[in-house]
Every structure is written in structure tokens, then in C-alpha cells.
Image: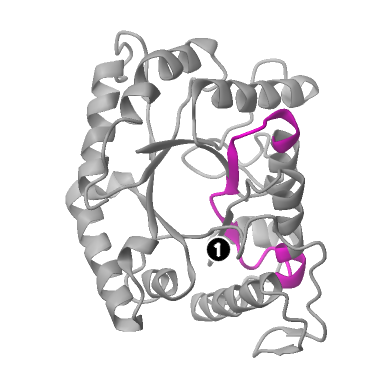
């Protein structure tokens, strides 16, 4: 089983003058500890549940490019990019650039977008939900066409690309793995089955609900003739892990047990964030005790 680290919070001691050094150190420590991947949100304002909107928020793809320059093996992705934020051709070019400069370490995380406040605040159009999903599907089609090297015109309902040239193309072939975030049963999971290489579900839904969502994904795969096992199943959670489980957190043994239960559900990669991400003790625990044990856990069905 694999473990990924999400960093949603950039409000650290010392303020923005030291943010680059601190984020760079987090990426390097995550790699040394054995994390498989590093993820950032693609938001422009801080989101509810993490902090006030005014708290520091780095632009996601730039932050990943910075992290790529500080690391050698860590996989890098947005969890996830809202389809409304960038024109699809530019987004694919951005993701391809990250993949090339990181020597093939990029994920292409994408979703239908939800944060109306930052759209309104920064002047980005925020279409109705149904249209956002239609735009998401067109974006997925454009991405696959560009990564396939097909420069023929794309004429969609929302996007027209006269020559979707993408040079250089991605290092990962046929393309960086596409992750679609969300657990919508009729649209999101259908798009995963049809277009994606990975899905991401909220672990906070509970093990029974995550299992039910995976069953629905399996049904969509059967409907489109897609092998279910081709799709990487991931979850996102928030965990506090300390040496002794203090402050309501998990001990290393409890964390390993949590990841074991995720693997039993069929989760290939458990991604989580933690409020102690800027503290060296967290990475010491993960690198010495948790990740080596979790890497030995077999994923159900694999």
C-alpha cells in the first residue's frame, strides 16, 4: 500500500517571507520519509475547514513545480484542479510541463470545481453544476487528445482548439495518470470509469460508504467495458500522528491499523493531511515506523 501527503495549509511560523523554505523542506522531508506522493489543493483562497479565506494559499501548479525542483522521486499532483480555473489547453500544457521537468512524476488531478467565493472574488465565471461537469468531460477528452499527439481541431460545446499542439509531450506514456476527485455516483464515478486512471474519495465518509462508492465505480466500469483493477483507488483524510497518540491523535500503531483497514477496502493509496506537517517529529515517526510497515500491507483484490 502507498501513502501520500496532502498539504492544504501554508500558514506557518515566520510568515510568507519563509514560506518557500518551509514548503520546500516539507517536500524534501516527505520524500526522505518514504511518502509516495505530495499533493496540494488547487484553490486561490483558503477553504473552510482549514482556515479563514485570508490565510496564505499558494497557487497549486507553481507550488508543485517548486516541489519538483526540491525532490527526485516524489509523485506530485493537485487534489484537485477545478475545471473552471484554466482553459483546458493551457491546463494540459501546464501539467505536461510539470511532468517533463519532474522527469515523469506528475498526476493530473481534476474535478468539477465547487468554490463559488473564489470564482466571484477573482472574476472567474462559475457556471451551473451541470455545465461544469460537461466542461470537465470536454477537458478530459482534450487532455487525452493532446497527450496522444493528435493536433486535429477539437470542436466541443464549450471549447474550440484549432491546433492542440503539445510539445514537448509528457514523459509518462501514454500520459500522466488522470485522477478525478469526488464521489458523485451518477456523473463523477462514471467519468472515472470512462476516462481516469485514479479516483479519490473522502475517507471521512466512513468505511462502509467508501466501500459502497467503490461498488458503484465497479458497476460503471462494467458498463463501459473498463477493467476495474486498472483504476487506482485513493482516499483523502486528516490525521494527527504523534509518538504517543497525545492530543487526541493516533499513535504509530493506531495509524498502521488505520491504513490496514483502508487496504482491506481495496484502497491502493491513502492520502492524508496533518496539522503537524511543519514539525520534524511527524516525518521522523512516518519514516521510521509507519511507512515501512504500511508498504508491506497488501491491498485487497491486488
Q: Which residue lies furthest to the left in this view?
A: 208
Q: Could you say where residue 254 lies in the image, as x and y percent from the top left?
A: 24, 22
Report the residue marked by disc 1. 113
| Residue at left offset 60%, top offset 43% | 76
Categorize mark 1 by other alpha carbons within 10 Å: few (<14), some (14-19), many (20+).
many
> Is 170 located above or below residue 77 in the figure?
below
Q: How many labels does the image show?
A: 1
Choose between 205 and 269: the one closer to the eye: 269
Q: What element carries label 1?
A: loop
Q: Could you say where residue 19 lies in the image, as x and y percent from the top left?
A: 73, 25
Q: Could you say where residue 62 lies in the image, as x and y percent from the top left?
A: 75, 44
In reply to whether residue 209 is colored magenta, the answer given is no
Where's the N terminus, which quadrant?
top left
| Residue at left offset 41%, top offset 13% | 288
Choose between 79 and 126: the one closer to the eye: 79
Q: Could you say where residue 100 lies in the image, as x and y percent from the top left?
A: 75, 51
> Is 243 located above or below residue 267 in the figure?
above
| Residue at left offset 30%, top offset 82% | 223
For the rendered model, the colour scheme is one colour
The picture quadrant where one finds residue 157 is bottom right
Choose between 171 and 6: the one closer to the eye: 171
Magenta span? 68-92
In reply to whether residue 80 is colored magenta, the answer given is yes
The picture quadrant where one finds residue 147 is bottom right
Choose between 4 and 159: the one closer to the eye: 4
Q: Give left or right: position of 112 versus 100.
A: left
Q: Give left or right: position of 145 versus 272.
A: right
| Residue at left offset 72%, top offset 50% | 98
Amino acid at each position: 500500500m502507498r501513502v501520500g501527503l496532502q498539504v492544504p495549509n501554508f500558514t506557518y511560523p515566520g510568515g510568507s517571507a519563509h514560506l518557500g523554505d518551509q514548503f520546500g523542506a516539507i517536500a524534501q522531508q516527505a520524500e526522505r520519509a518514504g511518502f509516495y506522493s505530495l499533493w496540494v489543493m488547487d484553490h486561490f483562497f483558503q477553504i473552510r475547514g482549514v482556515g479563514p479565506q485570508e490565510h496564505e494559499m499558494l497557487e497549486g501548479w507553481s507550488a508543485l513545480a517548486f516541489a519538483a525542483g526540491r525532490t527526485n522521486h516524489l509523485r506530485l499532483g493537485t487534489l484537485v484542479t477545478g475545471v473552471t480555473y484554466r482553459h483546458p489547453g493551457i491546463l494540459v500544457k501546464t501539467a505536461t510541463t510539470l511532468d517533463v521537468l519532474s522527469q515523469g512524476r506528475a498526476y493530473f488531478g481534476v474535478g468539477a470545481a465547487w468554490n463559488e467565493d473564489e470564482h466571484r472574488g477573482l472574476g472567474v465565471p462559475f457556471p451551473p453544476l451541470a455545465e461544469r461537469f460537461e466542461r470537465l468531460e470536454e477537458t478530459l477528452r482534450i487532455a487525452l487528445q493532446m497527450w496522444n499527439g493528435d493536433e486535429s481541431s477539437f470542436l466541443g460545446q464549450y471549447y474550440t482548439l484549432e491546433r492542440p499542439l503539445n510539445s514537448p509531450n509528457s514523459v509518462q506514456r501514454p500520459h500522466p495518470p488522470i485522477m478525478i476527485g469526488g464521489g458523485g455516483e451518477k456523473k463523477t464515478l462514471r467519468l472515472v470509469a470512462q476516462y481516469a486512471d485514479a479516483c479519490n474519495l473522502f475517507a471521512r465518509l466512513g468505511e462502509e460508504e467508501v466501500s459502497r462508492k467503490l461498488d458503484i465505480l465497479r458497476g460503471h466500469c462494467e458498463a463501459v467495458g473498463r477493467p476495474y483493477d486498472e483504476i487506482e483507488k485513493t482516499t483523502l483524510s486528516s490525521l494527527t500522528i504523534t509518538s504517543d497518540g497525545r492530543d487526541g491523535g493516533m499513535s504509530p500503531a493506531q495509524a498502521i491499523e488505520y491504513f490496514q483497514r483502508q487496504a482491506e477496502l481495496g484502497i491502493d493509496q491513502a492520502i492524508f493531511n496533518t496539522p503537524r506537517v511543519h514539525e520534524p517529529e511527524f516525518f521522523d515517526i512516518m519514516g521510521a515506523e509507519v511507512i515501512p510497515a504500511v508498504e508491506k500491507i497488501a491491498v485487497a483484490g491486488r
